[in-house]
Image (cartoon, rainbow, N blue to C red):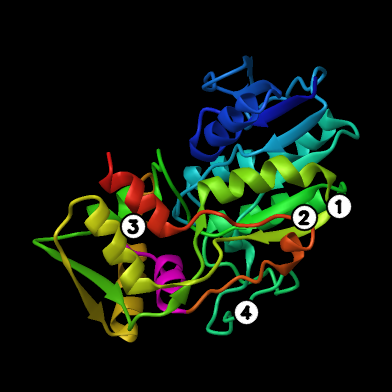
Amino acid sequence: MTTIAVTGASGFCGSHIATTAAARGINVLCLGRRPGPVGRHIPWDAARDVPDLSDADLVVHCAAAVGDPVPGSPAEAAMHAVNVDGTARLLEAAAGRPVVWVSSASVYAPGPDRARVTEDHPAHGHLNAYGRTKAAGEALALAAGAVVLRPRAVYGPGDPHLVPRLLSRVRRGLLMLPGPSVRLSLTAVENLTEACLMASGWPPGAYNIVDPAPYDRDEAIRTVLRAHGVRARIGHVPLPVARAVAGAAQTLTRLRPHAEPLLTRYAVDQLAHSVVLDVSRAESQGWVAGRTLQDYATALLGR
């Protein structure tokens, strides 16, 4: 029986991958500080230790530090310790085993020209520590011959980041967004899970992983709000104003290095410009995105 090691298996993406793998009869090792939902727990602190992968046939690396910390803060240093140094330790322990490394579309250079992003799009000029450390970590993984998956804005059951953050921004029945609506790629966690479980046999390299078609930003957000029973209308902040507010918020947060600003230049960039990822490279390996945002909303409304 194949044994798969899933790092970060107690987290959002890792728990979905571990649970799905176990349901398919795969033996699962859950690596992380906390036990995963299935399989055997192998304690691992990605910021400090070399993991024990001696019983694994292949590795899916989901463990990551996420957020938008203040530059030069202890939180940024902690993020580097997990996303970059932790990757180096993982690759050392993998010792030739197939590795699927879960990256992020945040590695792609910011700016307006992202209407059809292939895996060859530049990966520099990042606006926050998350993008920088994920790019540095995946560079190590690519050099070691890993398969690197680049999802964008992963959502789904148990999401602790994207949807809760969105819902928390609703004030008095109003959600303000930067600029007019744009086209955006999103990734259902089920689509990412399927790619992770297929990808160990793919040629080494990077692969975009997103839903079958991009979404209209405002309509996608309305879909999520309705599915969660939140009545709110969407307003639009002129883009120059949004950028100015984000810059001021980041400047003020430097006085509180352990906090994250309510709005950042990265968040404005991600919401105000079309970001549509091309998935033809993954599709050429037989992967098909079968889940959509409407499926997510329908499941919530049917609970």
Mark toward the start of the polypeptide (3 vs 2): 2
- Tell which tag, 4 or 1, sits nearer the viewer: 4
Q: Position of residue 206 (x, y in %)?
A: 76, 59
Q: Nearer the viewer, residue 187 or 257?
A: 187
Indicate the amino acid at tag 2: Ala
Q: Please say if the residues under marks 1 and 3 sit with CB atoms less than 8 Å apart.
A: no
Indicate the amino acid at tag 1: Ala
Q: Nearer the viewer, residue 234 or 242?
A: 234
Indicate the amino acid at tag 3: Pro
Indicate the amino acid at tag 4: Arg
How many numbered badges does the structure rendering display? 4
Mark 2: give few (<14), some (14-19) or many (20+) Cα within 10 Å: some
Identify the residue position indicated by label 3 in the image.
261
Mark toward the start of the polypeptide (4 vs 1): 4
Q: Position of residue 141 (x, y in %)?
A: 79, 48
Cα separation, mark 4 vs mark 2, equals 22 Å
Q: Is residue 117 magenta?
A: no
Element under label 3?
A: loop
Identify the residue position indicated by label 1 in the image.
143
Q: Please say if the residues under marks 4 and 2 sit with CB atoms less than 8 Å apart.
A: no
Q: Please say if the residues under marks 1 and 2 sit with CB atoms less than 8 Å apart.
A: yes
Horizontal side, residue 131 vs residue 118: left or right:
left
Mark toward the start of the polypeptide (1 vs 3): 1
- Tell which tag, 3 or 2, sits nearer the viewer: 2
Residue 8 appears in the rendering: no
Horizontal side, residue 13 vs residue 233: left or right:
right
Residue at x 60% of width, y 26% of height: 23
Part of the protein shown in magenta: 261-273
